[in-house]
Each structure stands twice: as structure tokens, then as C-alpha cells.
Amino acid sequence: QLQFVESGGGLVQPGGSLNLSCAASGFQMEHYAIGWFRQTPGKEREAISCISSRDGGGSVYLIETVKGRFTISRDNAKNTVYLQMNSLKPEDTATYYCAAEYYPGNCQGSLYSGMMRYWGKGTLVTVSS
């Protein structure tokens, strides 16, 4: 059966770091575009990053507000995608979700098209002093 689980959230002080994991079971993540999203209650869900499938060339994308602070990567042997988050700010506080779509092109085409069909349950990140 397909399983898709985020982990790694928690409470950190401003300037701290967290490494979020998105682990898949029941499908091979390397064939899927994987996106990271975040949402705070009362605000619209925000796409922040994605990594393309093998057929899509494995390219990565980050929105401007997290460039230089966040890094997305993939470990196919572990069937896991990571989001390394450094220099965290209070405005990064949100529930973070990973999502997947079978998509052979650049992952931005899936990230912004509403075609991410498979979602994890989320992991909460709180940045506060």
C-alpha cells in the first residue's frame, strides 16, 4: 500500500535549522515530481520548492524568499526527499507538506498546475524565541 510520510518538524529558535524528510513506500519516488508546501491557518497554501523526476532531469526549484536558506534533495536509495532549512525565521512557522505527481518534465509544471495528487499529512515547524 502507498505510504507518504513527512517528519522532522519541531520548535527551533530564529536562526536555527531543521531537516524535513518525506519518505515514500509503495511507489518509486524517483519517477515523481516532489513538491514542498507550507500553510498557516487563515492563509493560502504556499508552494516553496520542488525537485523533478528522473525523466524530468532532477532539476530543483526554490522560491526567492527561501533561496540561500533552504535546500531540496533526493535520496533514491532511501526513497526519500529532504528539505534542509537553515537560518529559520518566525515567518517560516507553518505546517509543511510534501506532495507527489507522476510528471516527466520540470517539476514547476506540476507544482503550479494543481496536479500534485498525493499528499502527506504534514509536519509542524515553529520558529520562536
Image (cartoon, rainbow, N blue to C red):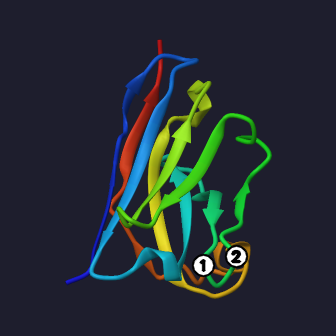
Q: Residue at x 75, y 51 (%)?
A: 63
Q: Residue at x 52, y 51 (%)?
A: 39
Which residue is farthest top? 129
Q: Quadrant of residue 103?
A: bottom right
Q: Residue at x 47, y 82 (%)?
A: 117
Which of 23/57 is in front? 57
Amino acid found under the numbered disc labelled 1: Arg
Verify CB contact (< 8 Å) between mark 1 and mark 2: yes
Q: Is residue 43 above or below residue 56?
A: above
Q: Secondary structure at mark 2?
A: loop
**Residue topped by disc 1:** 54
Q: Secondary structure at mark 1?
A: loop
Q: Residue at x 56, y 65 (%)?
A: 35
- Side of 46 relative to 76 (left or right): right
Residue 20 in percent (x, y) is at 43, 45
Which of 124/23 is in front? 23
- Quadrant where the N terminus sits is bottom left
Residue 127 in percent (x, y) is at 48, 25
Other residues around mark 1 within 10 Å, as few (<14) / some (14–19) / many (≥20): some
Q: How far apart are the alpha carbons under marks 1 and 2?
A: 5 Å
Amino acid found under the numbered disc labelled 2: Gly
- Side of 41 relative to 24 (left or right): right
**Residue topped by disc 2:** 57
Which residue is farthest front? 77
Other residues around mark 2 within 10 Å, as few (<14) / some (14–19) / many (≥20): few
Q: How many numbered tags mark residues here? A: 2
Residue 81 in percent (x, y) is at 46, 59
